[in-house]
Structure formats: structure tokens, C-alpha cells
Amino acid sequence: MKKAFILALFVLGMCNASAFAMAQEILLTELYSIMPIDDPKDDLNEGRPRPTQIHASIDGDELSIGTDADERAYVEVIDPETGEVIVEGEVEGETTMNIPEEGDYEVYIYTESGMVLTGEFMVE
């Protein structure tokens, strides 16, 4: 009886897990990078932010962008069906952007060093 009760609580908890909004990390990939080939100071991309220093997540309709680096970044959220820029802005540290409508979107993050990161997410 005790095991059945624990199992029922577990199943109930799994069914209600979506009721508690949790931020979902957006997988960012490096789309483009400008790097001089003949730069003698470039020792394995030293000085450039690593893609893991920039992160994005979506929680409901709130897009959060954060940079661990001291570098500014420019962010665009685009509707891939129309090509329309939904929101845009600069990031230095962390920022939150409101996505006005449900749908599938792409985020593009442009850093000062010339790196472009992109990721896809959905607003429900």
C-alpha cells in the first residue's frame, strides 16, 4: 500500500511538472567568427569569449541572455518564417527580453570580437 501511494505521488508529480515554469536553456552554436589567420598573438583564440561564456534561456515569454565575459553583445530575435526582427538590443552582463507572441524563433548574438552565435527556441 505504501509503495502504491509513493508511486501515485510520483506519477502525479510528473504530470504537474509542466505547471511549474522552468527556464529552458537554448543551445547556442557558433555560426561565424572573424579571426585573422596571421595574428601572432592568437594563441588558441585567446582573448575571445568562448561560446560557453554566453548563454540564453527561455522561460514562458521571457528570453534571458547573459554573458560571463566583459564584452558587449548585440541580440536579434527573428521569426524564421517571415524574416522579421521581433526584438533586438544590446547586452552587457545580463538582460531579459519579452517575446510578444507564441511561435518558433531564432536568436542571433553578435559579439564585439566578431563571433556570431545562433539558437532556436519556442514560445508557448
Image (spheres, grey):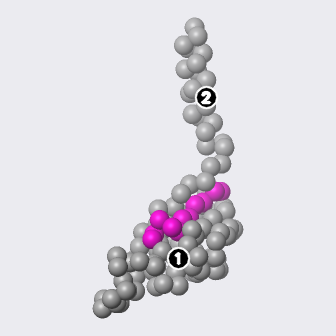
Q: What x and y, as percent, mark residue 99? A: 66, 68
Q: Where is residue 29 in the image (x, y as percent from the top left)?
A: 42, 69
Nearer the observer, 95 or 13: 95
Q: Identify which residue is drawn at 64% across, 71% down.
A: 93
Residue 109 disc label = 1
Secondary structure state at the residue bearing disc 1: strand
Disc sitting over residue 12 in the figure: 2
Q: How far apart are marks 1 and 2 (CA)?
A: 39 Å
Residue 59 covered by magenta stretch: yes
Q: Residue lying at the far left in this picture: please name it.
A: 38
Residue beneath the point at 65% across and 80% down: 89
Along the viewing direction, whichever of 69 and 57 lies nearer the viewer: 69
Q: What residue type is labelled 1?
A: Ile
Could you tell me which secondary element the residue under label 2 belongs to? Answer: helix
Q: Which of marks 1 and 2 is nearer the N terminus?
A: 2
Closest to the observer, 52 or 119: 52
Q: Would residue 99 be seen by someone viewing this image from the given angle?
A: no
Residue drawn at x 61%, y 39% is: 17
Q: Position of residue 41 (x, y in %)?
A: 37, 86
Q: Quadrant of the C terminus?
A: bottom right
